Every structure is written in C-alpha cells, then in structure tokens.
Amino acid sequence: MKAEGHPEYREVVFHDLSCDFKFITRSTIQTRETINHEGKDYPLIKIEVSAESHPFYTGKHKIVDTAGRVEKFRQKFGTVGSKTAVAAG
C-alpha cells in the first residue's frame, strides 16, 4: 500500500455532550481539537448522541433538540400543515 494515499488511522476520543460520556476508538476523522484523557493527548470529536445517551439503548425517552431545529422550522414555515397546530375558531 502507498503510505501517502491513505488518511491517518489513529485513536480518537468521542465526547457525548448530552451526558458527558467519553470513549476512545480508532478513526480517520479529522479534527482541530485535542483532549488529555487518562494521561494521554488524543484528537477530540464532540457528538450529541451515543449509545450511552440514545433512548433505544437507555430505555429512557427524551427529546434532544440542541440545535433548535423544530423552532427554526416553525419560524420559517409557521404552523401551515402542522398536525400540532391549534385550530383557530
């Protein structure tokens, strides 16, 4: 294999921001941030959902809308066609 044709495959820390859970795995993903985890520096990837916080794995249902996507949609389109819209008399 040619060394210059492949991305670097290395250990990376993924940080689940919703429950402050960190885990190490190997990845080629590029990042500018680093973190010192267990005495060693690793590239850092911030995520919003992992198996530690996902309702399917935890059995707890919660709505995760950190980016405000629902509110942005409602501001842009209003309640036209919304099933949750209150009918005006």
Image (cartoon, rainbow, N blue to C red):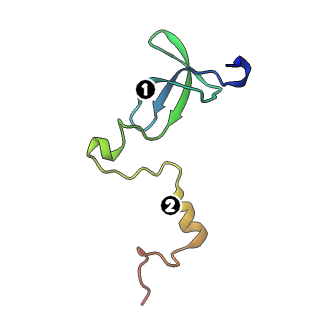
* Residue drawn at point x = 53 percent, y = 67 percent: 74
Residue under pointer 2: 70
Q: Would residue 40 be found to the left or right of residue 64 on screen?
A: right
Amino acid carrying label 1: it is Lys
Give the secondary structure at mark 2: helix
Disc 2 vs disc 1: Cβ atoms closer than 8 Å? no
Q: Is residue 62 left or right of residue 2?
A: left
Q: Considering depth in this image, is 29 or 88 the residue closer to the camera?
A: 29
> Is 83 situated above or below 55?
below
Residue 73 picture location, percent across and down: 56, 64
- Residue extending furthest bottom? 89
The quarter of the rendered structure image containing the N terminus is: top right
Question: Could you tell me which residue is drawn at 28 percent across and 41 percent down?
Answer: 58
Q: x and y percent of residue 18 in the render?
A: 42, 38
In the image, taking residue 49 as reference, residue 6 lies left or right, namely right
* Spot occupied by residue 12 in the image (x, y as percentages of width and height): 53, 22
Of the residues under marks 2 and 1, which one precedes in the sequence?
1
